[in-house]
Image (cartoon, rainbow, N blue to C red):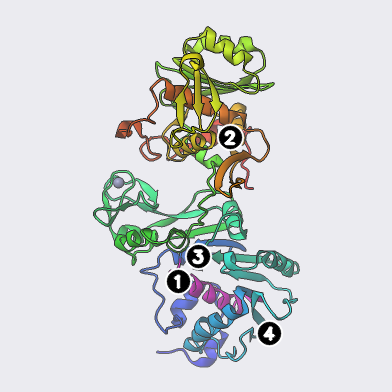
Amino acid sequence: MPTPVHEQEEKQYFSILQWIAERGIVSEKGEALDFYNHPFLLDILTDWNPKIVVKACAQVGKSVTFTLKTLFAVKYLRFNVIYTFPTDDDVKEFVSSKVNKILQANHADFSGMDTDSIERKEISDRFIFFKGTVSKTAAISNSADLVIHDEASRSDQPTLTTYKSRLKASQYKGRWLFSNPTTEKDLLDQEWKKSDQKEWTVECPACHVKQTMVWPDSVDIVAKTFQCRLCKAALSDDVRRYGEWVAQNPGSDISGYHLSHLIAPKISAAEIIEDSEGDQEYFNNFVLGEPYNPGDFSVSRQTILDIWTPKDIRTPNTYIGVDVGNVKWYTVWSDKGVIKTGKFTKWDDLDELIRFYKPKGGVIDAMPDNTMAKYYVDTYDFMQMSFFKENADNPQTLVWYGEDTRKGIVYSHRDRILDRMLTDMVEAKFLIGVDSDRNFLEYIKHFETLRRIKETNAKGIERYVWSSTTGVDHLVFATLYGYLARMGAGAGVFWQEPSAADKPSVLGSDNTWDIRHAFRDANEGGYVENHD
Ligand SMILES: [Zn+2]
């Protein structure tokens, strides 16, 4: 039997789920909310963290979720809310097609809220202002408890920042951002990176490994099914349905969620494969819920932590790479990857390293002064010196070797060989098995300064070059010389199609699941997580 109207109005709700269930709250189409096919929305709906960021694909119900939260917050939590869209036209479209329809479909709960005004809704002396970030009318000067930025990545970025000042008088100071991402480094991406970065995590019924759903590893392209990233067993829609949110960056005060079509039980693998064959910008932004920057490729701290292993990866063969400057930086490699990094100032120290590691191959920087490089090439059979050059005869060649009077020289195309090595790092084709000490932190720092920037030469031809934001990238080059040394000694996997054994994917190598944990444990007190 329905509750009499006068009692309904007195009832206060503290739980949004209880409110939805007891009052039969419906969507803008008048339908029951479909959590069966959108199970990942439940946690987002009930998350009252003042700082929320959702990096999302298209069409998975995020706008309705946030509209319901907003209406609940105004009516039951007595918040004043500012809700922004990129433009005033977007506001008009959203309020008439979504908000007003939800108000009408649930009129018993919102009888006091009129649908005439687009910009302003009011109930029990609390308001919601809807506003474009690009707007012909004056900015909203009211203070609010909660500012919501829908389509944050397509909004005017400086305006988003100014809305923070509207929260000063509030205790709650809520700021929720959500959007299909566009490129990196906008507000959404920055907040996402600072957040706890929750990813929907499912358990493989065959091998019981818990895992996030990623493109392309979680999809069997041939069978057109979802698959376990580890054992390749097929994952049913129910496996995807009964996942849970797991923070990838726990401890942050910003609650972050990443929505992609890969986690939506209603969306098939075949649909995703088809989308992947079309426009890549669309596929990344709207299907995967990821930013897309074709020229923007970098190696982050996480990239390096993902290939770091506490295990002993020494092999009988070793290789050495030396970057030359006032300070000399080196890496020592095994067939599996980097086993030692460091620096020295006295050349004797290099002879000592050579005596100790007995390398099979070595490459030393021939710049800025090749006197000492020559000495090492003459003294040690295995040693070669490196020059960067473009191969005029054969522009496709990345690495080639000097002959006759140029014997002992290894030439390479600087930016393309860096592309190759950094791609190998991203794809975990070699590991880093060094102690997680100060040297390793320095190592990470040098890589983090790398940026691939677009240059246009005198002929108007565009190309990407690697540059360091600080100029302190010596360990990148020490790594590159070691990489070249290993390749030159025939141990690299560069020249032939790698076999399964040569190609340790991040998942295949058994250091993946606890690596961040292991890293922190090994650095107790000496390592501070940097959220910036
Ligand atoms: Zn499995």
Say few, some or many: other residues with alpha carbon within 10 Å of mark 2 (under 14 / 14 to 19 / 20 or more): many
Q: Are marks 2 and 3 in contact (CB under 8 Å)?
A: no
Q: Which mark is residue 532?
A: none
**Label 3 vs label 4, nearer the camera:** 3
Q: Are marks 4 and 2 in contact (CB under 8 Å)?
A: no
Q: Earlier in the sequence, mark 1 or mark 3?
A: 3
Disc 1 residue type? Gly
Q: Earlier in the sequence, mark 4 or mark 2?
A: 4
Start-end of magenta stretch: 58-82
Residue beneath label 3, please? 44
Rendered position, 120 above or below 242: below
Q: How far across and how far down the image is residue 263, in percent?
A: 39, 60
Q: Name the image quarter holding the N terminus.
A: bottom left
Disc 2 residue type? Ile
Say few, some or many: other residues with alpha carbon within 10 Å of mark 1 (under 14 / 14 to 19 / 20 or more): some
In the picture, measured across the screen, residue 281 lies left or right of residue 505, that is right
Residue beneath label 2, please? 444
CA separation, marks 2 and 1? 39 Å
Disc 4 residue type? Asp
Q: Is residue 313 visible?
A: no
Residue beneath label 4, please? 125
In the picture, measured across the screen, residue 135 lies left or right of residue 360, that is right
Q: Is residue 62 magenta?
A: yes
Q: Are marks 1 and 3 in contact (CB under 8 Å)?
A: no
CA separation, marks 4 and 2? 54 Å
